[in-house]
Image: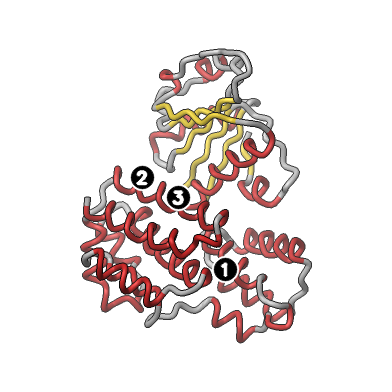
Amino acid sequence: MKIDPLSILLNKDFILNKKFYFISGNELSFIQHIKTVIIEKFQNNEEITLININTINDFIDEPGLFENKKIYLVENSKEVEAKSLNKLQNNDGVFIFVQENSPKIKRVKKIFEVDKHSYLIDCYDLDKNSKIKILNEFLRLFKINIDQDIYWFLIEKLDNKYVFLENSLNKIFKLDQKEITLSNIKKLLTIDESGKEKIFFNLLKKNKEIVGVYREKILTPSDVNDFYYYCKFLCYLIIDCKDVDEYRKKIPVYLFREKNFLIDIYKRYNSKKKKLLLNLLFSTERMLRKESDLSLVSGLRFLLNLKKITIF
């Protein structure tokens, strides 16, 4: 069964009652976010154990008394057939497949789409209607009313990638009601080119220099969030692009002075390092949400780990 990923994100009462979840599309940050949300929804209801396997043929059923519910994270879907899914019906575990769109998985996606025990969840850049749904839900949750000019400005200017859009809305709606003006929102959605975000471009310097610049620029939890989400934007440019030519075209115009540096960074990444980068982004974001008092330390740890992955 095919469902809209926003059904999972925006409906707090959405019930995860399927055996198989196949998360795909071409927006990698959205794909990973949906995977995290699904896992967290299961965790909110019961104790779970996460198990990574390469394909479902690597699955081993090991029943036991008083064990946590098992969620199997399946890296590759190439061996999926309708009959192989049927064989797993009596197992108590849940299977989550995550795979970016490609011609090779069209057949597999069709299997999950028609299977009554499955959810097929395609994640793409947000369109206007999706942004409207998300903004309306945020307004409802925060119990805030905004002027029409602000509303439609947000629909037009908010990022098409879900995680960036969500971060922008969280920053905006944490303002006092009287501070939610068109002028203030424009400032929040504008990148400060001369400030803390530029720490990223010290990535290849010695650790002592990186730590010095970080401590000079990052003074508050708000600084950490701004710095992290700017780095996250640059990291996803690396993750999303398949080759140097595509990456070069997607570098924002305002970064023309850093273009050669960014291309050098991109060339250091292969598919394995991109996966490590994804894991770093999501572990850091989870830490920032849970441990706001330690965000300054978490931001610096993120920066040094980012350097480690890049130069490894």
- 1 or 3: tag closer to the N-terminus: 3
Measured as percent of width and height from the top left, residue 212 is found at 31, 72
Q: Residues within 10 Å of mark 1 (few under 14, many from 20)?
A: some
Residue in the image at 61% along x and 14% along y: 65
Q: Secondary structure at mark 3?
A: helix
Q: Secondary structure at mark 2?
A: helix
Residue 52's disc number? none
Residue at which label 2 appears? 275
Residue at which label 1 appears? 168
Decide: marks 1, 3 in contact (CB < 8 A)? Answer: no
Residue at which label 3 appears? 28
Q: CA distance from mark 1 to mark 3?
A: 19 Å
Q: Amino acid at mark 1?
A: Ser
Left or right position of 256 against 164:
left
Q: Amino acid at mark 2?
A: Lys
- 1 or 2: tag closer to the N-terminus: 1
Q: Give residue 69's quadrant in the image.
A: top right
Left or right position of 298 against 188:
left
Q: Secondary structure at mark 1?
A: helix
